[in-house]
Image (cartoon, rainbow, N blue to C red):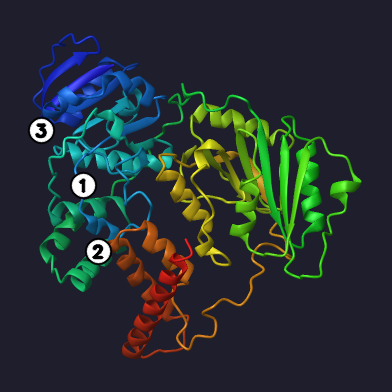
Amino acid sequence: MIFVYHINTKIVAVETEAGKQLDFEFKKSVAEGLSHIAIKNPNSKIVWCRTDCKDVLNIKELCTLFHHDKLLLSFNPSSSNYISKAIGYVDESLFINVNKKVSFPCWQMSSIVGIVHASVLIELKNKIPFDSDFDYYLHSVAKLAMPLGLLCYSEPQLLRESNKKETSNVSNYILFRFVKQHYKKRWVFLLFFNLFLYERKLVLLAFLASFFYRKRNSGNINLENIKATSSRNVINKKTIDVIIPTIGRKDYLYDVLQDLTKQTHLPLNVIIVEQNPDIASVSELDYLKNQSWPFFIKHIFTHHAGACNARNLALNQVQSEWIFLADDDIRFENDFIYETFENINKSGVKAVSIKCVQNKEKSIFKPVYQWGSFGSGCSFVERKAIEKCDFNMGFEFGYGEDNDFGMQLRNLGQDVLYLSEPQILHLKAPMGGFRTKPSLAWHNDKIQPKPSPTVMLYQMKHNTRQQNLGYKTILFFKYYNRQQIKNPVYYLIHYRKQWNQSVLWANQLNQKI
């Protein structure tokens, strides 16, 4: 492990883990200096730290935190970030509203403290420019490499105690430059428009200056040869329970159970929550008792329909170390559970969502990466990791309960990775299913809410103000051609009423939480 201490744009000291000073005379940027050190020490972890944080650097925990080589960790203890909250006008992802109390996935890195493996810096050499601004370079690295499998986190445990010295946001020139170099060109125009619309800022010079910069691409970056075998032990007992909510899909569910019986790694329990809102109805799943199964089946029959309620009922019955949240219309191979456990062990995480493909869909391999969502019917999670989580009843019969569940996990410090192998075949059964909905409370409103109140609820709970307003702008333009009011002024007036109606209902749904 090599420690690099710097002051703003200059490296002032390089030390070994034992504290031995290394000779290093370098007058160029900190980013280029790290690359030179990586080339000389290709098997080392490289730690950078601002000199005023050296005394609180949590050296003892670094090896535990950095559990495999395809990680990029950093931390900014300030309440503000390098790039201002205005980035939310162009980026709706969960990586913007960072929870700094826990390990949290994000591309917003910091020059204050961080750690990366030398092999990553070597791969990025000559592919991402060595910006003189170290913070800008780190942001660029994370933004480009995250989709390629570099796992990037804001990690508060890098420091023993937080130095609450506030960080100043960069200028609008840097903000527009970053958007121009890392997003599609249209987002530069939308950023300019949103800043004027919502903040009454006319940043014309910063807007124009951004067009002198070229977009940065990740097409020539390949991280596949970098080792990503975690030193963490996240699977001990290897027991797993399967949760399957179902409604009106008797034959499809039977096929799922047959696939489970053929697994090389059998589940301990299969928890089936069968729903039928008809008060006079009884269970149609006769094969649960008529046949013998190589696992214990816990069958819950309820007249209370709803995906959130069903999954919460099942979660209360879980006994195993791990949980497979499954749908009732999926198929998978015999070694599905075994292979998923193998990939979880390599990644060292406690929650993964697995790629679902449909019939005749061409499958494209992607590396393991940090997903911006969560699959409530295709995920493995550790039971202890979700003890404080549930499927929020405010989302019942709407959309967003799965993403909300994923955000609950992340706000507890548990990231969700996406696995493209093994795969799940999702049949998209035409009958039954969880989207059998009753009439929602707002269906008879004269002014129909836009967006759906459950979508608005998610926006209000997990996104920044700027992200919500940016979404409002995008929805305004997208929805225009899908509705009947073609007069732009009348449409704007009507759209505002719809938006406010959605906020009203979202606040009422929030009271159910």
Instruction: Name the side, left or right, on which 195 lies relative to 462.
Output: left
Q: Residue at x 18, y 71 (%)?
A: 196
Q: Residue at x 42, y 44 (%)?
A: 410
Instruction: State which quadrant residue 2 falls in.
Output: top left
Q: Quick one: label 3 or label 2, which is nearer the N terminus?
A: 3
Give me the C-alpha separation between circle 1 and circle 3: 18 Å
Residue, far right: 290
Looking at the rendered structure, the kind of residue marked 1 is Asn
Q: Quick one: label 1 or label 3, which is nearer the N terminus?
A: 3
Q: Is any part of residue 5 visible from this angle? A: yes
Return the residue nearer the eye: 147 or 380. 380
Residue 25 in the image, given as x and y percentages of width and height: 10, 17
Tell me if residue 429 comes above or below residue 38 in the rendering: below
Return the residue nearer the eye: 87 or 120. 87
Q: Which mark is residue 9?
A: 3
Name the residue beneath numbered marker 1.
Answer: 81
Name the residue beneath numbered marker 2.
Answer: 191
Tell me if residue 118 comes above or below residue 453 in the rendering: above
Q: Nearer the viewer, mark 2 or mark 1?
A: 1
Give me the C-alpha separation between circle 3 and circle 2: 29 Å
Residue 433 in the image, given as x and y percentages of width and height: 69, 62
Return the residue nearer the eye: 253 or 473. 253
Q: Which mark is residue 381?
A: none
Q: Residue at x 76, y 40 (%)?
A: 260
**Do the residues bearing badges 1 and 3 touch, measured as CB atoms within 8 Å?**
no
